[in-house]
Amino acid sequence: MNAPRQAPVRPSSANAPADEVSTRTERWLPRVMLSAMLALILMLLVSMGSYYIYRHEQAFEARAADIETQAHARLEQSLQEEVSYLIQGLNDHRATFDTTLSKQLAHHAQLAVQAANRSYQKLNAAVSAAQMRFLLTELLRPMGHPDAGIAPFIIEADGRLRLFALDPRQEGQSLATVVDDAGLLLTERLSDTAILGDGATRLRWRSADEAGGMVDIHAQVAHFAPFDWIIGVGVFNHRAQHIVRAQALEALSRYQPTKNRAMVLIDQNGQVLATNNSSGLTVEPTRGTVADWARIIARAGRTGGKTLQLDLQRPPAATAQPHLAFVAGQDQWGWTLAAIAGLDDMADTIVAERQRMEASKRDDFMVTLLTMFTATAIALLLSMVFYRWIDRRFRHYQNDIDTRNRALKESARELRLSARVFEASNEAIAILDHRFRIVSVNPALERISGYHHADIVGRHCAELLIGEHTGSDLWRRTASRLRSARHWAGETTLQRADGSDYPGWISLGAIANDSGRVTHFVVSIADISERKRTEQRLRQLAEYDALTGLPNRVLLLDRLGSTIEQARRHSSHLAVLFIDLDRFKNINDSLGHAVGDGLLRQVAGRLSAVVRSCDTVSRLGGDEFVVLLAELDSAARAGIVASKILKALAAPYDVDGHELSITPSIGITVFPEDGDNRDLLLKNADAAMYHAKENGRNSYQFFTDDLNDRAQTRLALENELRRALSRHEFSLHFQPQLHLTTGRLVGAEALLRWHHPERGMIPPDQFIPIAEETGLILPLGAWVLRQACAIAQQWRTEGLGDLCIAVNISALQVRREHLEPTVIEALGHSRLPAHLLELEVTESALMTQQTDVSATLDAIHALGVKLAIDDFGTGYSSLAYLKRFKLDKLKIDRSFIRDLPDDEEDAHLTQAIIGIAHHLGMSVVAEGVETEAQEAFLSHLKCDLAQGYLYARPLPPEAFRQMQIDLGAQAASNPADSTA
């Protein structure tokens, strides 16, 4: 190649060898590539050709085997179809047997009756009745179809067989008392069929030639009115079956099978019944001897049928040849049908097909060789063309590489300058790749975060720099925004290498290449800890009280607004308690503001200790506090909290050596009853607070009169309840329990009553919940137990009889450890036998702390005290505790009894409860029985005991004692003594 003329430049001695090596490389490298490419193409062609020939040979062998398999399958399918065809013919023949037989019988019966009628009409006037009977009998005797076993018969009016051609020995015998296998009289059945039916019947008939055995007879009968005869024709069932089988064998013998095949019919003993042979096989019917192949076919038929390979002899061959036989399952007659064909018939077909495939394989091999040679020639031609093209491209790329190398050196110098700027910057900077993995960080970032360069390079930036997990929603939204807007900035909490957190301002931007594709991201981080501390101090000063540290008015109004919205969404209550310290100004004026401030701080601490964590205690200023109670289930809860605040603030204070006492006045408003916005709630609470001050201070007042009255009433009842026991304001009433079967008085339930000196009789549902909530139920329940036992023993002492006294026990008494000692004390003090005391426990008492409750009740039950479950069905109604606890009685709540017996649902439930209780060994008490209809219905359901207004209302002890006397109880001459 001639180089163009140019100014002579002498290459330096250092570059000359390199240029020479480069020139030689440019000359031989394309040639080496061409040679390698040709060698590779030839190897591929040879490999592909060899592989094709190998695979073709395998396909040939597989196809040959497949042809043999398919031929075998086609032969088996053909045999199966031929057998199915014959089986269908046999089934059709059997299916039409009954219909054909019925038609034949009807035809012959009609002929017989017509012949009798015609003869009677012609000869009636000419002969006597006896002669007419004889002539008609002999006329009908030869009729029917003797070859098919069909013969006539005549039955006279008295049931005597006048003609019976089926078995002449039976003629003259009477059928008047003969019954068939169904227990019906034959004469009545035949008469009903002839007169009322269509004449067709099937009878079980005794035949003389069967040694008195029962034989099926098909018959067609008609009524011959002149002599009141039953004329008919019949055939023995076994004779008909024999005929139909003979017809089936005859039809099978006429069938012509496919060429070179044999159809064989074999009975269950292996005897060949029929054969159709077009193959020359030795398979003729046999009598007495059973061939091995026939025995094999019979066995296969008994097992449901299958395909067999048999070795059978086909003349003139001297040896047995393999044959394929398809055997059907044994039919209802015990016959097995098989189709047989020789396997050598397939050989010619297989050989011809294999020869055709051999010829096709040779042709394919020649085409493959020709294709390979053609492909090799084309590959050589294309390789030469490609060689010239690649040589030109190679030279072009070499020049382009030299140009790029010079540009890279220039870029490297610029990058080194940028790297020095990156390292020297005082702002924390990190470089990320397009997948947000850290590529590099500068020393400023290491200094701020505490991470070393080697620890974070290659890791994802989300957790180390941004402060979010890679799977968090914030990071996914941030990454999506960066890919679209390519810039993001925001404030977040970051974590240093030592685990400490610090607030940071993150600025993240994308870097794109010349094509606009994002390749890297730049992250800058600023530590804003000092700024956040300044903001926190300003927020503390703006939202919290400097003296007490409680939220001030600003923060209170914000929380109150949020709580109102939450209560409005959930349809719940909230309460605002406006608190003002009574006569706080006197303390400031007399002891100074320092003491007053100390007192305010202690008041704030006590208020915070009383309320829940979700509530807010705020100081509005001076001696005014506001408590915000959120998530209240009822407005009454606000009064309970106010009572706790009164009690907490009433305790003395120790402030700088001064013992002080202070009381609050509290005004209460409830959302939404007293206002639907924060300003109105605060205003009304303030008004209620002043109302409390007007009423004497040291109290709380609800804004509304209704809530205020109820809260005051409850508080008054609580205070008066504490004094009622010591003032003997409680008494017991007794409601009788009667046995429904005998009507005898067997027990009574002790019921607590409160006679208030001013309010009168207070219902139990008003003071019992208060007693349980305050814990007063414990001493009150102990008093009830002692009184009930004492009164019951007094009645026994007076000789009024033994009554079981039922006492209600609250859930709080059961869960405490004092119940067992209290019961023992009451029984011991009164000397009442333990079996006459019954404790009624509600369902709720059994459902909590079941282990402790079970131990307590078991100990009491061991004393002999009876246990009853009260108000069953109104609580949890769990059947598990009925099994777990040792209960003696079950009391059905009055809500189930009220609508009996008219309410079907209550009736079913009551019946189910009584059944369950009796099954578990418990007696049942029905509460609230008020009508005689209810009593009668419960007696019908076998309920044991009942109580209610039908018998008596709860009575004082004296009235109940008088009722016992009126019912016939006689006082004993010697008072009964207890052995408890």
Image (tube, rainbow, N blue to C red):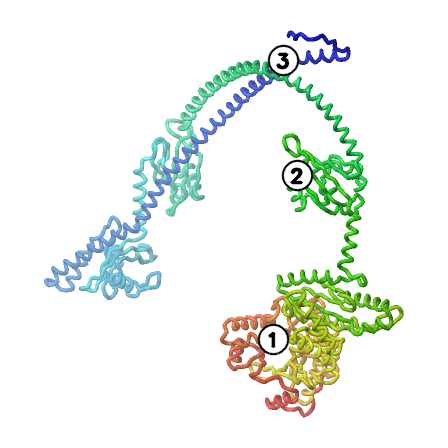
Quarter of the view holding residue 687:
bottom right
Task: Characterize the local packing of mark 1: few (<14), some (14-19) or many (20 or more) Cα atoms within 10 angstroms.
Answer: many
Q: Locate residue 690, reporting x and y percent.
A: 72, 74
Query: Which one is closest to the eye, mark 1 or mark 3?
Result: 3
Q: Residue at x 49, y 16 (%)?
A: 370
Q: Residue at x 89, y 70 (%)?
A: 657
Residue projecting furthest to the left: 126
Q: Locate residue 551, reporting x and y percent.
A: 75, 61
Kind of residue at disc 2: Arg
Task: Say which residue label 1 marks.
Answer: 891
Q: Which mark is residue 31?
A: 3
Q: Which mark is residue 486?
A: 2
Task: Characterize the local packing of mark 3: few (<14), some (14-19) or many (20 or more) Cα atoms within 10 angstroms.
Answer: some
Query: Which one is closest to the eye, mark 2 or mark 1?
Result: 2
Nearer-N-terminus badge (2/1): 2
Q: Locate residue 35, reporting x and y percent.
A: 61, 14
Assign the N terminus to one quadrant of the image: top right
CA separation, marks 2 and 1? Answer: 77 Å
Instruction: Name the element at disc 2.
Output: loop
Instruction: Name the element at disc 1.
Output: strand
> From the viewer's perspective, is residue 403 above or below residue 301?
above
Assign the C terminus to one quadrant of the image: bottom right
Q: How many marks?
A: 3
Kind of residue at disc 3: Arg
Is residue 858 visible in the rendered image? The answer is: no
Q: Residue at x 21, y 64 (%)?
A: 228
Nearer-N-terminus badge (1/3): 3
Residue projecting furthest to the bottom: 973
Q: Locate residue 133, reporting x and y percent.
A: 17, 62
